[in-house]
Image (cartoon, rainbow, N blue to C red):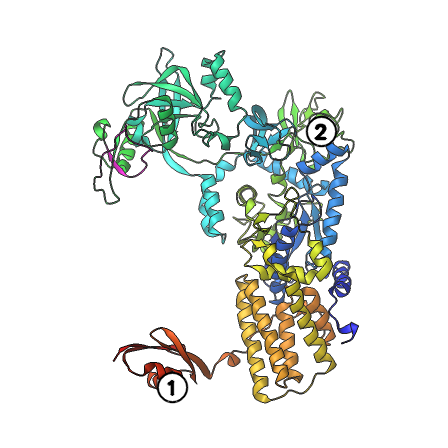
Amino acid sequence: MSDVERYDPLAIEGPIAQRWYDERTYSLRSDPDREPFYALTMFPYPSGDLHMGHAEIFSIHDALVRHKRMQGFDVLNPIGWDAFGLPAENAAKSRGADPREWTYANIEEQLSTIVRLGYSFDWSTRLHTCDPEYYRWTQWIFLELLDAGLAYRREALVNWCPGCETVLANEQVIDGRCERSDDVVVRKPLTQWFARITDYADELLADLDTIDWPERVKLMQRNWIGRSEGAEITFRTADDRADEVVVYTTRPDTIFGATYFVFAPEHPLVRERMAGDVDYDAFLDEVSKRSEIERQSSSADGSKRGVRLNFDVTNPFTGEAIPAYAADYVLMDYGTGAIMAVPVGDQRDFDFARQEGLEIRVIIRPTDEDGNLLDELDADTMTEAYTGPGVMVNSGEYDGLPYQEAKTAIIRDVEAKGWGSAKVNTRLRDWLVSRQRSWGPPVPVIHCPSCGEVGVPAEDLPVALPDDLDFTVSGSPLAMHPTWKHVPCPGCGSEDAVRDTDTLDTFVDSSWYFLRFLSPNDDERAWPKDAADRWLPVDQYTGGVEHAILHLLYARFVTKALRDRGHLSADEPFRALLNQGQVILNGAGMSKSRGNLVAPVEVYGTYGADTLRATMLFASPPEDDIDWADVSPAGMHKWLSRVWRLTVEHLADPGEDGPEDEAAALRREAAVAIAGASDDYEARKYNTAIAKMMTLTNAVMDAERKGVGGAPRREALETVLLLLAPIAPFITEELWRRLGNDGSVHAQRWPTADLSLLVQDEVEMVVQVNGKVRGRIALPVGSTQDAIEAAATADPNVAEHLEGVTVVKTIVVPDKLVNFVVRPA
């Protein structure tokens, strides 16, 4: 075979990839007569070149996109970069450089790799969230929220990293330290901007039932929102002050078991009444160093940390004065920052009561699910709280009531006595959107001593970052800039006004980027409403499960808020969601610290991009992890080489059609492959689709040995190329051209199976004796039971196993198997 005929992906792929990019081959040429399909992958962060995780997600996504185009859909497949954020700012500080340089250099590096790997993005949509042309509209959205009363400013306890000098989300605090800098994180009060996502809690919860997302992601969002029904009940301090303290509880039926009371350490009443107390001050300082997640987890020795307060609280139902504590497991930002502690029915309360020697009062007798009484609880011997069903005991007039009825009755009486009311609560808290850093969109607000908080007029957007920020200073370079923040008030003209020096969190940037893709170069509006009506919600969104809560929840909230402002019609941003697995090595995640990184270039630089893409998709279903130690790029390259060889050999010597029955058999194999692979593509089972293409390739080779060439072989090879095109775009493009076909293989219609070829005249049936396979028989489809039994018993091996036994029963599964159940004669 000549050198020209050898499969050399490094020679053919580069020119094709560059042509697709230069000619903008996959730019959307919208056709209103075709059904729209918006395919979106979570856009990358430019922290360096693409890693294997990017290669996986883009390979999955591109197979979907190319398949949809071949099916005739009008596909929007945009690309951009989530380009603001702390890594760039930290890199700039460490180098004393502008984060723009670091960010744009990384974008260009990633872009080059994306092009080289042949991912069919619409490059006319390219955007970067750090461009003023983009964040102008991020700021506009913030002002829309502000105008709707959905954005506000207040003091809040935050996780503060002294190294990064900014606020961290709970998820960014690991074992009390910043996940990036490893500095000890402290809790401190800070005035921040928030978005009222809690106003949409019920709708965010209900609409999960309307979208096609993985159930585990829906469950994570439901748990994060955490809707619960209960009551707010007012307690009072048991002294002359009789300060009111409101608690929220989902179990008002257990109030007779409240034997102590717990405040969040930061509760204002506690701060006031414990001012100057040495033990309390030390405890408060210790708690400030722990994240909320850590505070709700057990400490190393299994105990909860807390201090006794210098006052008691009165239980309104029993009239008892119960001891009050401050404990780290109660959070100021959830509920009211205070709880009635019922150790018999709550594990955290139980653990704390055992630790402090507090009373555990039994107020419920367990029952089974049918209401039958079980053994009574013994407070002295209990090892854990009881959270199951039961009837009330030691609960005054509510004794004997099933706990659900007691809950209803107590809420009714609480309202009647003026002690509180029924209340629906959520764990969801308002979204903290401001950050004390400088590589982000400035908050578009001016603070005026006369007018207060004034939104920057829309015509003055963007509020651009200055070009001369000094990233060597301590603190926020934006706040430290000598002139940028000093501006006249747009309301009254006061020269004493100053800009807000916080920036918006990167989650704000990514909460709406799918909208900007609809008109990325429009200077007059963020997006055309008619385009949003045509394309939203996104038909398929692909990305990692690590974004299951925050990014996806924020995007859903922003979509609903913008809908209510009249800018959208869609209720949800993403109709369907696919979470790909991780690419790991020997059971562990790839990382520099582990020294187990495999860079994509190591694969495509040796075997080509098609091999990398196909290896990713053949390894497992998209949702499963891929252990790179278990896959074989060399094996995939060998199969692609076989496809190449079969095609170029056919071109060199097409041959004759060959025996009619063998040619028909090959055509049937092609029809089977089309039908099976088509189903697999729809189900995103690319691994089994590739397996069916491999089977067809083997059938071509087998038919070739039987003298089949000419049109039947060419048709089968073209079928392989069409089915393979979305997965391995370069080899299929090159071979399609070499076969003399007009146009790109990717512009062809997806093949449809000739159903008449799928109808079988004859089937092979398994013959069993007592469940063990003893033979196989070929019969016409739909044969009668008598015919099946006659053919089975005529098989020599089956007949041998039926000698000297009695057939008790014959089981026939039509067209599949026959099983003789026998016993000794």
* Magenta stretch prevailing secondary structure: loop
The amino acid type found where label 1 is placed reads: Ala
Q: Residue at x 58, y 60 (%)?
A: 619
- Magenta segment: does it hold 376? yes
**Mark 2 vs 1, N-terminal side:** 2
Q: Please, is residue 593 above or below residue 667 in the view? A: above
Residue at the disc numbered 1: 791
Which residue lies most toward the bottom here?
659
Give whichever of 526, 537 is nearer the camera.
Answer: 537
Magenta region: 374-392
Q: Position of residue 596 (x, y in %)?
A: 64, 48
Secondary structure at badge 2 equals helix
Can residue 749 be seen here? The reply is: no
| Disc 1 crowd, CA 10 A, few/some/many (<14, 14-19, 20+) | some
Give whichever of 499, 111 is nearer the camera.
Answer: 111
Residue at the disc numbered 2: 478
